[in-house]
Image: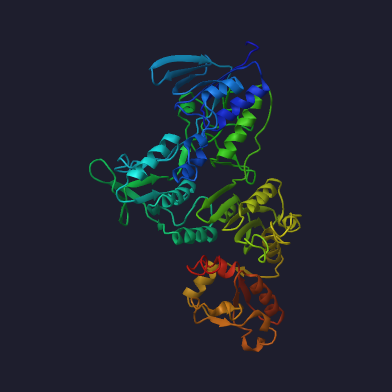
Amino acid sequence: MDKKRNIVIIGGGACGPKTAARARRLDSSAQITMVQDEELISYAGCGLPYYISNVIKSRNALLVRDAAAFKRISNVDVLPGTRVESIDRAAHKVNLLELAAGKKFSLDYHKLVIATGANPLLPPIKGINLQGVHVLKRVPDADEIRTLIDESVTKKAVIVGAGLIGVEMAEALAARGLEVTMVEALDKVLPGILDQEISGLLANHITSKGVTLKLGQKVVEFAGGGGKVSRTITDKESIAGDVVIFAIGVRPNSKLAKEAGLEIGPFGDIAVNEYLQTSDPDIYAGGDCVANVSIITGKKAFVPMGSTANKHGHVIAANITGGSDRFPGIVGTACVKVFDFNAGRVGLGEKQAIEAGFEVVTALVAGPDKPGYYPGSREVIIKLIVDRKTRRILGGQGAGPGEVVKRIDVLAAGITMGMTVDTLADLDLAYAPPYNSAMDVLHHTANLLRNKLEGRTVGISPAAAKKKIADEDDFILLDVRSKFENDSTWLETPQMQHLPQPKIYDELDKLDKDTETVVICLRGGRAYQACCTLKAAGFKDVKFVEGSLICWGRDGVYGEQVL
C-alpha cells in the first residue's frame, strides 16, 4: 500500500464534510475525495424550516461551504452531482456515475467512509406523488415548498407527522400565513420524544396558535384533480389543503452498504463498532445511516441527529488517518422551538425506562426560569425520571416559554456521567437574577424526587387527578391557592374544597382526616407544603398534584392566564 492515503467519502451532508475537513488537518498528504449525489454540499439542513418561514432570508446563509471552498481551504476534491453506483470491496474501488454527463468511472480507496444519511419514510399511500405533497430533506425541497406556499390557492396546509420536522414546519407555515392542520397517527405530539405530560402541554400551546391537531388519525390517501393535491384523507375524515408536508420519520440510507455485503443492524442501519468501523475494516460509516449505543442501556438506538453526525465525523477522521478514537454513544438529547415554546428531552422516557427493566420513579415540577421579580421571567416544566434502586438519573424532559434547553443540557452532562438525583440536588449551578433563581427548577425537581424516594410525600400527575374526578372517586380535591387566584371557576367539581395554604393550621377541623385528600395549587410547591402539614396532623391519605395547575393543561389556564 502506498504511504499516501487515498480516502473516499460518500455523502456531503454533515458527517462527510466533517470527516473530510478533520482528516485533512490530521494528514496533510492524503488524497481525499468526497462524492455527493446532489449539487449542494455541507449545508445546514436543520435550518431549512427557518428558511421556509423567512426567519432566514437567504438560502445562501444555509450553505456552509461549496466544492470550490473545500478544495481551496481543505484541499479536498469534491464531486457534486455524482452518484456512487456500487462498492467493490475486493478491489477497493467505488463505481460512480456523473449524473449530468452520464459518465461512468471509478475511484480507488484505502479507506472508505459511508455517510449517506437517512431517507424520509414514504409508505405506498395512494396519491403520495401528487403535486403539492412534499418531504423536507434538502435545500431544493425547501425551495419548492416556498414556491408552493406562494402559489397556494387555498392557503391551507396539512402536515402529516407530529415529530420534530412536523412541529417546526407547523410554525413555519403558520408564519407564512397558511391555515395549518397537523395529522399524527399516534395519540400525542412528538410521540417518539416526549412523555404525555410534557407532550400535552406542547399540544395545547400549538393549538393556541391556531394549528388544528388531528391526533390518532392515519392518512390513507391524498386526493385532487389535475395531478395536484387538494385533500388529505384520513381513516376518520377529509382535510382540505393544497400544501402537504409529509414527515413521519426517516430510515437509514444503507442501500450501498447492503449491496456491498456489509453487516446491517436491526434498524436497517449500517452496523458499526465503537470506532465507527463497519464489518469491513477498511470501511467506516457515520451520521444518520448508523445507529448508536445508548450510554444508559448499552443497547443500540436509532436517533438521527445532525449533532451526532458531526461527532461521528470527528471520530472517523481520526481513525482513517491512523488513530483509534472511540465514539462512546449517546443519551438521546433533542430540543425544538415551537412558536413561543421550547421543548427538549434527554435519556429515556418513562415507558422506555420501564421497558429497559428499571424501577422508575418520576417527578414533575413547574417553576420560573429566573426569579419572578426579574423582568422576562418565564415558566418551565421539568419531568425527571430516576431508577429507584440506584437513584441514577435515567431521563429528563421539559417544555415551556422559559429557558428549557440549558436544563436539558445539564441533564445530558449528568446522565452521561452517571449522576444520581442526590448529586443533582446539590449541583452548584450558576446563580444571578438575570439568569436563574437561587434554587434552579432542576434542584426543586431533584428534591421532590428525593422526598418521594424516601417516603416523605406522595405525588400524583395532573392526568391521574383528572381521572379521579372523571371516575367520581370519593376524595377531596383541596385547592390551597389564595382567593384572588381562585377566582377562576373552571375547575369546579363536587370533590373540590378551597382552603388557602396560610389558613390550614387554623382551619384543619373543616377537613375530614379519614377521606383521601389530594392537594392542588398553581405550581405544586404550596400543595406539597400543605400536604406535609396535613400528614403531620394525622391525615391518613394525603397526596398532592405535581406541577398542579401549570401542568393541568386546560386552555385558558395553562397558556394565556398563567404564562
> In which quadrant of the rendered view does residue 70 lie?
top right
Say if residue 307 shows up in the picture.
yes
- Which residue is situated farthest in the top direction here? 2
Q: Residue at x 58, y 77 (%)?
A: 485
**x, y (%) of residue 180?**
39, 53
Camera sees residue 112: no
Query: Image check: 256 left or right of 313?
Result: left
Q: Residue at the location (52% across, 61% down)?
A: 201
- Return the x and y of residue 410 as percentages of the image width and height: 68, 50
Q: Say which of 144 and 328 sits in front.
A: 144
- Where is the C terminus found, in terms of image quarters? bottom right
Its colouring scheme is: rainbow
In the displayed structure, 242 sits above or below 317; it is below
- Give the number of callouts: 0
Looking at the image, which is closer to me, 375 or 458? 375
Instruction: State which quadrant residue 32 falls in.
Output: top right
Q: Left of 479 or right of it: where is 417?
A: right
Residue 232: x percent and y percent?
31, 50
Q: In the displayed image of the protein, which residue is found farthest to the bottom?
A: 509
Q: Is residue 344 above or below residue 505?
A: above
